[in-house]
Image (cartoon, coloured by chain):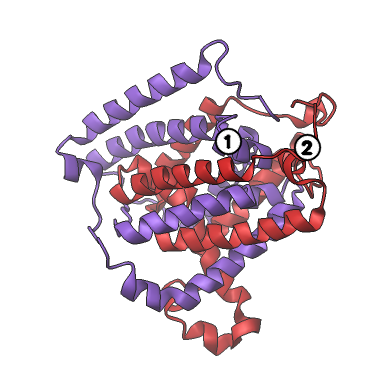
Amino acid sequence: MNPPNDIPARSKPLWNPYVVGAGLGVLSWLVFALVNQPLGVSTSLSAASGACAVPLLGSEGVSTNAYWMKTPFKWDYGMLFLVGTFLGSLLSTLASRSFRLEKVPGVWAEYFGPSVAKRMAVAFVGGILTMYGARMAGGCTSGHGISGSLQLAVSSWTFFLTMFVAGVSTATLLFRHRKTSNA
Amino acid sequence: MNLPITGEALRWLAIPFGILFGVLLHRGGVATYNVIVNQFRLKDFTVLKIMFTAVIVGGIGVLALHQTGHASYHIKPANMLGVSLGAALFGIGMVLYGYCPGTGIAAIATGSLHALVGFLGMLAGGVLYALSFVWIEAHLQNVAALGRLRLPDITGIPDWGWMGILVAIAAVIFWLLERPRAIATEGAR
């Protein structure tokens, strides 16, 4: 269950989860007060998908699409926030020397074996569902889960609870039969 | 204070704010597949602890800012069918991917290659949504569309009452989780 030598101690640079949560709360004060925007990820990501779809659908196909007309790709606050998120995680990873290439994570390997192709295929499908669901719901774990819930939005609490129930049900079904005995 | 920062400068605030967000996600341990999946397996409650604390600390502060005229709300519309269906797809997808959009980006920076592949999946999901957007808007988002409602609007319980309720719920949940011999946070890594 807890392989002692799986991860070197120095790559577990974790902070107390309540402190991290409080930090995210304070970050939301700053964002609301200074930028007058909610904290979110998936809106900008879907705008970025428009830019990526140009080779596929043609620039006209993208520029005339009703969704991307409403949410066009631009290097605005939301898009730069995603760049910052990547940079922040990278800095934190490098500072704690915990950068580590991971193809098949531990829990996955325990249940589905070491196949890289299998893991990548499921991650890809999972990514599709995650993003499609986020856009249909109007937000993700950031925009609804944190930023919307803290404003007591009905939509966001509906999202939070439904997402959690769906996730727990999926995980219960998915992780039933261990493939390897990882003592 | 009436939005002292505007235009270009405001846009660039996204970089330090994003960096803070990314650092917190990484140091919170939620840029890790095992931690997120084990939350949904109810074996590791790191995600819940972080999110619930963020909602309470953020909620109290933003409510105070709002009441003193320093912040406005950004409430997403309660299109109940779209939100519920989308949230269900999101929950399924998040377990398969092992990340959400924000933590997926943070995880790529830690070296997770399957987070990168799932990120490409998210871009594909964005394309699929854009292509089905008109149909979804016409057939789904107008069902049980209640508008930009907040919990105080539909319950009659005032804002600070709701904050009190959330603090009470969090206190009980956190107490249950932190009891000796409670389900270990570090378990099943």
* Numbered tag placed on residue A98 in the rendering: 2
Residue wearing tag 1: B41
Chain A is shown in which shade?
red
Q: State the SS at label 2.
A: loop
Image: B73 above or below A9: below
Spatial separation of the CA atoms under disc 2 and disc 1: 25 Å
**Residue farthest top in this picture:** B180
Please tell me in which quadrant of the rendered image residue B33 appears.
Answer: top right
Give the position of the N terminus of chain B as an image quadrant: top left
Q: Report the front residue among A65 and B74.
A: A65
How crowded is the residue under tag 2: few (<14 C-alpha within 10 Å), some, or many (20+)? Answer: some
Residue drawn where x is 80% and y is 32% of the image: A181
Q: Nearer the viewer, residue B31 or A26?
A: B31
Q: Residue A182: horizontal and vertical position, in percent?
A: 80, 31
Seen in the picture, residue B68 relative to B135 is either above or below; the reply is above
**Colour chosen for chain B:** purple
Report the number of discs.
2
Q: Residues within 10 Å of mark 1 (few under 14, many from 20)?
A: many
Q: Could you tell me residue A85's position as x and y percent?
A: 60, 49
- Determine whether, in the image, residue A4 is placed left or right of residue B88: right
**The C terminus of chain B lies in which quarter of the figure?**
top right
The type of residue carrying mark 1 is: Arg
Seen at 60% across and 69% down, the residue is: B124
* Residue A24 in sight from this viewpoint: yes
Is B154 left or right of B176, judged from the image as shown? left
Vertically, is B47 above or below B141? above
For label 1, the SS is loop
